Image (cartoon, grey):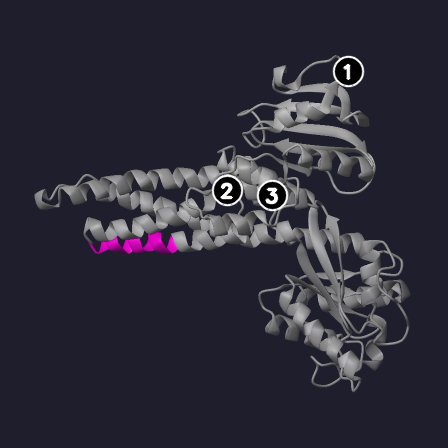
Amino acid sequence: MIHTDTIVALATPAGAGAIAVIRLSGEEAITIASSIFFSVSAKKLSNQKTHTIHLGHIKDGERVLDEVLVSVFKNPNSYTGEDVVEISCHGSAFIQQEIIQLCLRKGCRMAQAGEFTLRAFLNAKMDLSQAEAVADLIASDSEASHQLAIQQMRGGFSNEIKQLREELLNFASLIELELDFAEEDVEFANRDDFQQLITKITQVLKRLIDSFATGNVLKNGIPVAIVGEPNVGKSTLLNALLNEERAIVSDIAGTTRDTIEDEIVIGGVGFRFIDTAGIRETTDTIEGMGIKKTFEKIEQAQVVVYLFDPTSLQDATPSVLRTSPTKGDDYSSVLLEVGKIRNKYPQKQLVVVANKIDTLSEKDLSQMISHLTPQTSHLIPLSAKTGQGVEELKTTLLDFVNTGALRNNETIVTNTRHYDSLLKALEEIQKVQLGIHANLSGDLLAIDIRQALYHFGEITGEISNDELLGNIFANFCIGK
């Protein structure tokens, strides 16, 4: 992929604002900018040093379009590795389009999505995993996702992969060399040292692969399903967590017939809360569809919040999960529901929440806690209506997230493409390990080593193709 033309695009969000930045990159970037920019001190941009800013006017013939600041970045010391000019103009949408159209008439081409970052990759200003982190950084909406993107963009992940690839490549070269002296039975690659390297690579790959479970949820937000019978206060709890009237609340059972989702940030980590339809037996077709969706959302969630109303246990109603109603205040009905959720979804974190405690006496509240605490790992009494206990629920949810690796600045994998390549690389490394134990010849070991090196290279972009790059950079915004 050879890019020699000059591209232009709006680098700031579209729409009116105080200022806007229009970016040009390519061989003719400074020449084109010089033809439309007139410095207040009569300077020529082509004669200016790199990383300098100049005040002047953009003119279309004799017509002044705007007073601007122009920043000059000369190759190779720029974001793309090419000559780059950034025009900071006033944020009028009309002015932005006038300047961009003028640049196009002077010989620029409109940049495609992610083309500036693509050129940075092609000009070796960053590797492929770092380029992908640029998109993640732009999309980050929490402290955790921001920190993950910054770490990857600074090369934390790619440096670890490059080191493994380099060590493996050195041994691969020695094994390939042995093939040239096959008749003389010479061994250049010490098999004990090679075994130690393979063991080390296996451990690192497994650690990186395991980190994806944490990285993926930190990047995309942790899905939390709020479930329970109708009218226990699920929608009220969602509104209390979001601190806004997001869901309709009423005394009529079955108000929520579809799932409602919204996201908040707790302690720098994004949580995506899902308010679901109340679980009960029903003949209402629409409500039944909502209950079906509830079970689908539980499947997708990482954490399940089971909400119940302790004030209504005296007249408990059968639900889909419960085979028969259990009346009385011994809370066996709650434990039955909790047990069924645990049995059906053993891998999911479960929080049991007793709502409407503002209507309970101190004696009833104490009795409920003493009955349920020994048999529920996470019991939180709260009042969604008054907000009592909501902060405790937030703290409990945050405790479920493994942020230790993030705090310790360990490498965490967040990209599905990287995860897939790591799995394939591990598979090939394990084949090499089996080959060493079986005393396979160097030519057979070399085949699996080459495949492992290929998958390492896919991550950093040392092995790439136009289709792969097109798919990756298509997710970028125009101007980046």
Dot 1 alpha-carbon crowd within 10 angstroms: few under 14, some 14 to 19, many 20 or more = few
Q: Is residue 187 above or below residue 64?
A: below
10 Å neighbourhood of mark 2: few (<14), some, or many (≥20)?
Answer: many
- For disc 3, the marked residue is 114
- Residue 40: numbered disc: 1
Asked whether, in this view, residue 291 is left or right of residue 416, the answer is right
The answer to whether 193 appears left or right of 12 in the picture is left
Q: Which residues are magenta?
A: 426-439
Residue placed under numbered mark 2 in the picture: 128
Image quadrant in which you'd find residue 194: top left
Name of the residue lying farthest toward the top: 41
Q: What amino acid does circle 2 point to?
A: Leu
User: Considering only vertical position in the picture, is 31 above or below 138?
Assistant: above
Q: Residue at x 81, y 31 (%)?
A: 90
Residue 210 visible in the displayed image: no
Specify which label sits upstream in the sequence, 1 or 3: 1
Q: Amino acid at mark 3?
A: Gly
